[in-house]
Image: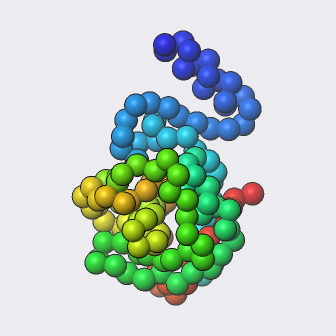
Amino acid sequence: MKLFLTLILSTIFLNGNIACISMSENPKDMENKIVLTQGKVLVGTEVFNVTYYDNPTSRSLVAQMPFTVELEDYAGIEKIFYPKESLSKEGAPKGADPSVGDIMYYAPWGDVAIFYKDFSYANGLIPLGYFDDIAGFMNALKTHTSTVTFEKSN
């Protein structure tokens, strides 16, 4: 099995796509998620990298890029926005346990949440990806506007 995974991952790396696979259920643990794409979020002149998971919900968000939104604070735990179009829920888990830096879709309300504090498991949360530098992102929001632009990386 180990040889099989090594062979698959070597093939993926040689083709220029990065992927990691395991059986963990923690969305922050990249060993269980296949990376769809790298993105960036612009706050003023600052750029922050985002990694998106390869799932139908993430793909439907990335397909809407580029877009600019106003972030709202919610409950002192997350920054939220409502995408222009609803995101896919195809094959989504029943819920998730977000960690600092995670980007999640809250399907019941249709908003995207960027968690800057840990939160407990909640039904309806679908992992989209995570910020590489959530602390820097939050600092940028303090010194700039809460209007941000989501883009695909080149």
User: Residue at coordinates 35% horizontally, 54% vertically from top-left?
Assistant: 95
* Count of numbered circles in the view: 0
The x, y position of residue 137, in whole percent, is 48, 70
Which residue is at the front of the view, 143 or 96? Answer: 96
- Residue 1 in view of the camera: yes
The x, y position of residue 65, in whole percent, is 68, 68
Rendered position, 84 above or below 133: below
Using the rendered view, name the quadrant where residue 98 is placed.
bottom left
Quadrant for the C terminus, please: bottom right
Rendered position, 12 above or below 87: above
User: Residue at coordinates 29% horizontally, 59% vertically from top-left?
Assistant: 122
The x, y position of residue 90, in whole percent, is 52, 52
The x, y position of residue 32, in whole percent, is 45, 37
Using the rendered view, name the quadrant where residue 19 is placed.
top right
User: Residue at coordinates 34% horizontally, 79% vertically from top-left?
Assistant: 74
Which residue is at the front of the view, 21 or 94? Answer: 94
- Colour scheme shown: rainbow
User: Residue at coordinates 46% horizontally, 71% vertically from top-left?
Assistant: 110
Q: Is residue 35 left or right of residue 75?
A: right
Q: Of all residues shown, which one is farthest toward the bottom?
A: 145
Q: Of all residues shown, which one is farthest toward the left?
A: 120
Q: Is residue 140 left or right of residue 117?
A: right
- Residue 42 in view of the camera: no
Q: Is residue 85 left or right of residue 145?
A: right
